[in-house]
Amino acid sequence: MEAQPKPLPRALGKHHWSVEDIFPAGTAPACAFRHRDYAIGMHTHAFIEINLVVAGRGWHHLEDHVFPLAAGDAFVIPEGARHGYERRGRLEVDHLLLHPRFLAEHLARLQAVPGFLPLFTVEPYFRAGEGVRHRLRLDRAATAALAALLAGFPPRGGREPADVLTAEALALAAVARLCRAWSGDHPGPAAAASPRMDAVLAVIDTVEQRHAEPLHLGDLAAAAGLAPSACCRLFRAVTGASPMEHLRQVRIRHAGVLLRSGLPLADVAARTGFCDAAHLARVFRRQAGVTPGAWRAGDRPGLHHI
């Protein structure tokens, strides 16, 4: 009889990794490494993780769902998602960890890449909620090529400018490969292959494209083709946040990037959909835990929240 997955307890010892645990100040915003014979209890982390199953078989536990793993499986694990691994004999997994500022700083270019939004913002939730039909499974050649790219990362924790630049460039290349693979497996405008997934993706895409505008719930619901109440229920069920909460998070994320560029606070507010500088300052402090001025100066304890 084939082995079956078992309920997975919380990881022994450390079971939450913060941004600072993985990315000390001055190090690259991305790192990669491999685990052999990988198994770990349920845990969380405050950064995005991309996993590639290089060899073997097992199960991935994501929140309250379990799905099987095989060589070539590649998927994104969002910040804060509770997950763990069970192996069936051999299980080799490559990990690519991305600092929150990596996506924030490269988002304008990444969201123009076909496949990025569904793979990074929608698929992780629908994979748990609707089984495995949205998964990305690379063929043997693509798996080997991506694994070779990840093997080229400099040692984790390096502060040499060349190492930081190399890690960031390799991370962008890896993300581009995955997005291209997703688009190849899910071609055409109906790539999401699910009306519910299409609706959530429409809200996310609208927010990314129009977050500087005075958007209301009705606007987001119209983009999804749903009534406002139905849009709220679906979006919260999938992402854990309401559409308007997601809009606020995206605005704060973009504001954080613009603040580092030196723009005056009023200009940042105008470019990110806030009424004025005072409104931005209130929301930013509540969301990030520091004032915009402190953030600009480098005091960023709430970095993983935006």
Image: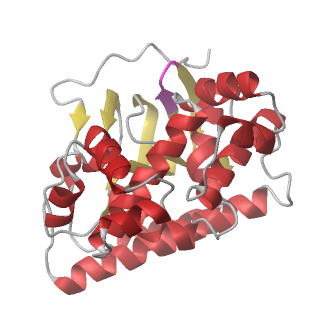
Magenta stretch, main secondary structure, is: strand
Residue 88: x and y, percent?
A: 47, 31
**In this rendering, is residue 208 above or below 288?**
below
Relative to 170, is 112 on the left or the right?
Answer: right
- The image's colouring method is secondary structure
Q: Which residues are magenta?
A: 59-64
> Residue 11's quadrant in the figure?
top left
For image coordinates 50% across by 33% down, the residue present is: 58
Residue 27: x and y, percent?
A: 18, 68
Relative to 24, is 235 on the left or the right?
Answer: right
> Which image quadrant: the N terminus?
top right
Q: Is residue 206 magenta?
A: no
The residue lying toward the viewer, choosing from 203 and 106, is: 203
Residue 202: x and y, percent?
A: 73, 47
Residue 104: x and y, percent?
A: 41, 62
Q: Is residue 61 magenta?
A: yes
> Residue 91's quadrant in the figure?
top left
Q: Which residue is at the far bottom?
A: 162
